[in-house]
Image (cartoon, rainbow, N blue to C red):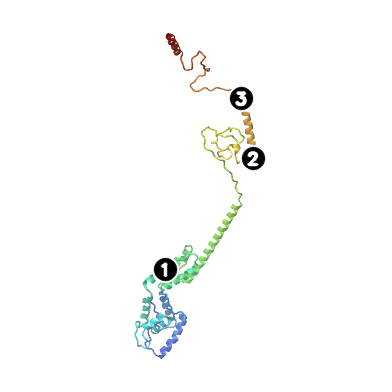
């Protein structure tokens, strides 16, 4: 990983009073570009990429050489990391040669200590799998994606950043942003375009939800304004009877029910269990007329029965004859005359 700029050239070798004065002034200039109260203490571990990136940028702005950068870098650390760096660095007077004798060796030592491969792979997987969440604007998604890129140590280029941002957007605006993403457009302008498209989509979605809520309210009001339907109590349905058999039981008027059996449907409601004149769906006036007609019909029926001639129905296979008694000389039904003559002869011989 190339963390060194072309401005960091190794030109300073000797350390004297002039170099010490210049190093102190240079530290103030670099600190102004680096940021005050921004010293790094070694946490988080993958923050080493951001730390080195900021330090190199501040060194480029102030034309810091590689020799001076070796002794300026520990000044922007703090805590145990700062003490450990001074133990591995050579002394300014040249009396002690440490583990890191140059700026590049110091950078490699920091990378070996803090940028382990497993942590870096985990952060890289988070960056490659990032997508826009529900309720997150396009600008907020870009800020979160930029933070993941920083934790990855800026190993992803600007083109990879734009590609990941386009793929992670919602499907409603992804196609428009992908078509707008050209090779020379900066990512800031791409984010602004995506934000405008997202605002239009969210405003349209809110209007649709408001329209659906209005329609649902209107449906509830119409349902509440409907008249309450009448509740009919169905008549009790008796057990089905045999074909042609009239159910037993007197009518409400005390007379025997004469008419169609109960297995026929009512002509008014098409339900079983009652006659047409007893249908609960008829009003009182209609019921009164039907009952009156029924009573008149029942009053005329006995007169018709009297005028009708009576006929005697014989059983199947029998003949009609006058009744037989023991005092008559005629034989009983089913006894032949020849049998009686033979019985008289046998009785006279015995005598």
In the rendered view, does 134 fall on the left or right side of 276?
Answer: left
Element under disc 1: helix
Whether residue 7 appears in this view of the structure is no
Label 1 belongs to which residue? Answer: 126
Label 3 belongs to which residue? Answer: 306
Could you say where residue 15 lies in the image, as x and y percent from the top left?
A: 38, 89
Whether residue 302 appears in this view of the structure is yes
**Count of numbered circles on the image:** 3
Element under disc 2: helix
Label 2 to label 1: alpha-carbon separation? 81 Å
In the rendered view, does 106 fall on the left or right side of 296?
Answer: left
Label 2 belongs to which residue? Answer: 284
Closer mark to the observer between disc 2 and disc 1: 2
Q: Residues within 10 Å of mark 3 (few under 14, many from 20)?
A: few
Quarter of the image for the C terminus: give it.
Answer: top left
C-beta proximity under 8 Å, tags 1 and 3: no
Could you say where residue 54 lies in the image, as x and y percent from the top left?
A: 43, 78
Label 1 to label 3: alpha-carbon separation? 107 Å
Closer to us: 44 or 317: 317
Q: Which residue is at 64% across, 40% downward?
A: 284
Label 3 to label 2: alpha-carbon separation? 35 Å
Q: Which residue is at 41% across, 88% downward?
A: 20
Q: Is residue 177 above or below residue 102?
A: above
Closer to us: 166 or 340: 340
C-beta proximity under 8 Å, tags 2 and 1: no
The mark that comes first in sequence, 2 or 1, is: 1
Closer mark to the observer between disc 3 and disc 2: 3
Q: Residues within 10 Å of mark 2 (few under 14, many from 20)?
A: few
Image quadrant in which you'd find residue 148:
bottom left
Q: Is residue 232 above or below residue 207?
A: above
The mark that comes first in sequence, 1 or 3, is: 1
């Amino acid at each position: 990983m190339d963390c060194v700029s072309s401005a960091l050239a190794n030109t300073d070798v000797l350390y004297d009073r002039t170099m010490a004065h210049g190093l102190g002034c240079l530290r103030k200039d670099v600190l102004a570009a680096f940021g005050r109260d921004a010293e790094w203490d070694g946490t988080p571990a993958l923050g080493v990429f951001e730390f080195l990136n900021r330090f190199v940028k501040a060194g480029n702005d102030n034309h810091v050489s590689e020799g001076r950068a070796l002794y300026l870098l520990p000044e922007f650390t703090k805590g145990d990391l700062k003490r450990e760096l001074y133990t591995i660095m050579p002394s300014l007077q040249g009396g002690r040669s440490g583990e890191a004798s140059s700026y590049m060796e110091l950078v490699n030592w920091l990378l070996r200590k803090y940028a382990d491969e497993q942590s870096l792979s985990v952060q890289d997987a988070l960056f490659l799998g990032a997508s826009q969440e529900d309720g997150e604007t396009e600008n907020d998604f870009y800020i979160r994606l930029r933070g993941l890129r920083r934790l990855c140590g800026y190993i992803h280029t600007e083109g990879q950043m734009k590609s990941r941002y386009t793929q992670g957007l919602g499907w409603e605006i992804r196609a428009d942003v992908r078509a707008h993403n050209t090779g020379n457009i900066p990512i800031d302008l791409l984010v602004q375009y995506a934000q405008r498209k997202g605002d239009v989509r969210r405003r349209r979605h809110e209007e649709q939800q408001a329209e659906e809520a209005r329609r649902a309210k209107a449906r509830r009001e119409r349902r509440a304004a409907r008249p309450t339907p009448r509740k009919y109590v169905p008549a009790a349905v008796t057990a089905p009877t045999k074909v042609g058999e009239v159910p037993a039981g007197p009518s409400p008027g005390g007379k025997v029910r004469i008419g169609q059996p109960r297995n026929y449907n009512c002509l008014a409601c098409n339900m079983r269990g009652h006659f047409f004149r007893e249908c609960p769906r008829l009003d009182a006036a209609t019921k009164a007329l039907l009952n009156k007609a029924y009573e008149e019909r029942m009053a005329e029926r006995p007169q018709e029965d009297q005028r009708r001639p009576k006929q005697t129905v014989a059983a199947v296979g029998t003949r009609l004859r006058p009744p037989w008694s023991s005092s008559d000389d005629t034989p009983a039904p089913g006894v032949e005359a020849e049998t009686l003559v033979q019985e008289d002869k046998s009785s006279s011989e015995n005598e």
